[in-house]
Image: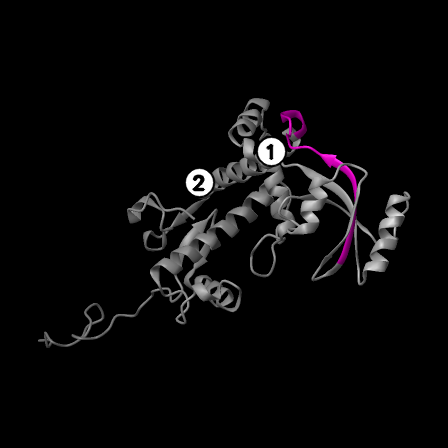
Amino acid sequence: MADPGAATADRPVAGATEPSHRDPDPPIADVAGRPIRLSDVERRADELRRGPRGKHIPPDGGSSPEIRRWIVRELVTDVVLAHEARAAGLLPPEGTGPDGRLPPAMIGMLVDRVTADVTVDETTARSFYQRNQDRYRRSEARRIRHVIRADEAAARDAADRFASGGEPGDDHAFELHRGELVGPVEDAVFAAVAGDVVGPIETDRGWHVAHVVAIDPAAVVPFEAARRGIEADLLAVERVQAFERWLEERRAVLATVDPEFEHPGHPIHGATTHRH
C-alpha cells in the first residue's frame, strides 16, 4: 500500500512552493492597446529627478503613491496624444521621440486641429472690456526726446539744438508717464507744453535736457481699438480650455488604469475637487 504522505504527480510535497508565473514588470495601465508598466514609471521618475522638476521627486524615485499617480497620468497623456496624432494623420507609426513624447511642434499642430472651431464672439469680448475698464485707461503722457550731459555747458548746447529744431544726435525718444522719471525733471516735463525745451536740470546722474514733442492726454482706449487684442487673449484661453476638455475625454475613452495608480483627482480617491 502506498505511503499516504508520499508525493505523487498530482499532489505536491507539503510545504513546497508552487512555480510563480507572476509578471515581474506588470502593466499598470493600457492606452489603446499599449501597456504602461512599472518600469516606465520608474524610468520617468529618474528622468524627472534629473530635470527642473526634480525637487518634486523624492530620492526613492516614484515610490510615493501620489508621485506614481502623477507620473502615470503623464505617461497616459503622452500615449493618448501620440495615438490621436496618428489617428489625425499627423504622425507616422514611429514618430514620437525616444521618450515616447510628441515633439512640441506636433502637439501644437494637434492643438490647432482640435481647437480649429473655437471662436470668441463680439458679445464675449465686449463683456470682458466692460468688466476690465482699468486695463484700458491711459494716463496722461509726454512724448519727449531726452539727453543727459556731464556738464552744464554741454547741456545748454543740447538745449539750443532742440530749440532751433535740431537734435543733439545721441538723444533718446520715448513716452513718459508720471512715476517713470521721478523728481524735478519729470515735474518740469509735465508742467511744459508741446514744443517746449526743458532744462538743463541737474540731478545725481548729470544735466538733463528734454524736448516735449507732443502731449497725449488721459483717455480710455475705445472698444474697437482694444477689440483685436481682447479677442486674441480670450481665444488663447478658450483654446487651452477646449483642448484640456478634449484631452480629458480622450483619456477616458482610450485609457484603463489600475485603481492603485489612478490620478489623484479621480473619484476613486474621493478628491473630485483636485485641481492643477
Is residue 267 found inside the magenta-colored segment of the image? no
| Residue occupying image coordinates x 77% and y 44% | 144
Q: Is residue 101 left or right of residue 70?
A: right
Is residue 224 found inside the magenta-colored segment of the image? yes
User: Which label lies toward us, 2 or 1?
Assistant: 1
Residue bounds of the magenta highlight: 207-225
Percent x, y for residue 186?
A: 68, 47
Q: Is residue 51 left or right of residue 225?
A: left
Alpha-carbon neighbours of circle 2 within 10 Å: few (<14), some, or many (≥20)?
Answer: few
How are the colours assigned in the image?
one colour
Closer to us: 23 or 123: 123
Question: Which quarter shows the N terminus?
Answer: bottom left
| Residue occupying image coordinates x 91% and y 44% | 164
Asked if the residues shown at circle 2 and circle 1 are in contact, with their CB atoms under 8 angstroms apart, the answer is no
Kind of residue at badge 2: Val
Percent x, y for residue 174?
A: 75, 46
Percent x, y for residue 236?
A: 58, 38
Closer to us: 91 or 101: 101
Closer to us: 109 or 184: 184
Alpha-carbon neighbours of circle 1 within 10 Å: few (<14), some, or many (≥20)?
Answer: few
Q: Which residue is mark 1?
A: 137
The mark that comes first in sequence, 2 or 1, is 1
The kind of secondary structure element at disc 1 is: strand
Kind of residue at badge 1: Arg
Q: Is residue 17 left or right of residue 210?
A: left
Task: Determine which of the numbered discs, if any, sits on residue 253 in the image.
Answer: 2
